[in-house]
Structures are given as structure tokens and as C-alpha cells.
Image: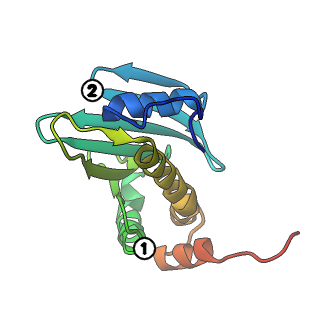
Amino acid sequence: MMLDADDDRDDAAPIDMLESYFSAHGWEHERLDDEVIAKVKGSWTTYELRALWRDEDSVLQFLAFPDIRVSDERRIAIYEAIGLINEQLWVGHFELWSSSGILLYRHAAMIEGEGGTLSLGAAELLVESAIDECERFYPVFQFVMWGGKTPKEALAAAMTETQGEA
């Protein structure tokens, strides 16, 4: 997915670039100072995407929330599943907020240069990889929480590639 080819900006402030990216895709979004929040419909659920810019550190924090809240009794199994999943990831990681039981995908990117800019390609990679990883591993969390599978069984079941057409 790319922005309009007539857009002559190759890069922009990180939050500005992400806001433009969300707008170009027609995704519902909201801008708050150094933060932008979007809603994106995936195969499994609607994801909330949240980007926060910390100018003093030149760090862009990108979060994707797959609309999963983990009950206290399933947390140990989900923590194990998160550990197994994170071993599979090259960029970003899943985590569970202990205070609320909210599951999320997080990636932090250090942006070089004073005031830092984000290229369209980097914005696309950041957003699409977060959505792809949430889509890829959403079934693992569902199998553990609702399917009665162990984290290892859930990961194996979710990673099975199907061949052909039904």
C-alpha cells in the first residue's frame, strides 16, 4: 500500500507522516499533539494503532492493540505464549499490561537527526509489520484463552500453513 504518487513529500515528522499514511488509506484516525491513533479492520478484529513521538529522545513508539483483554486466570499461559511468539519476531514484541490485562504489540524506532523525519517507506513498514504480526499471532492467543490449547500447541496450530483451496 502506498500513498498517492502525486504526493511529493518523501519524508516528514514521524507523527505527520503516519497521519498522512492513515488518511491516504481512509482509516479512521485522531491526532493529539505528538500522538496519532487509528482504527484498522483486520481479518480477525479491528486494531487500534497508536504512535507516540518523544522529541527529547527522538523515539517513535508504535503500538497495535488487537482488542484482547486477558483474564487473571489465563495470564500465566498468555505470558508463556508471548515468550514463544517473541522468539519468532525480528522487530517489535508482544506484551501484556499487568494493570489492565490488555495485550499489545509494541515497536520503538529511534529516528536520527534533530527533529527526525520518517520516510514513507519506513512508515509503511512500521504500520504493515505491526498489523501483519497481530494478524499472524491473533489465533495463538485465542487458542490459549478459549480453545483449551497449551501455548506450544496453540503456536504450532497457528503456524501450520494450509495448502490449496477448500
Residue 11: x and y in percent read 38, 37
- Which dot marks residue 88? 1
Depth check: give the residue in front, 4 or 104: 4
Amino acid type, label 2: Asp
Q: Is residue 94 left or right of residue 41?
A: left
Residue in the picture at 34% in, 51% down:
106
User: Which quadrant, please, contains the C terminus?
Assistant: bottom right
The answer to which of marks 2 and 1 sits earlier in the sequence is: 2
Tags 2 and 1 touching, CB below 8 Å: no
User: Which quadrant, please, contains the N terminus?
Assistant: top right
- Which dot marks residue 34? 2
Residue in the picture at 35% in, 71% down:
83
Depth check: give the residue in front, 41 or 71: 41
Q: Is residue 148 visible?
A: yes
Secondary structure beneath label 1: loop
Depth check: give the residue in front, 40 or 3: 3
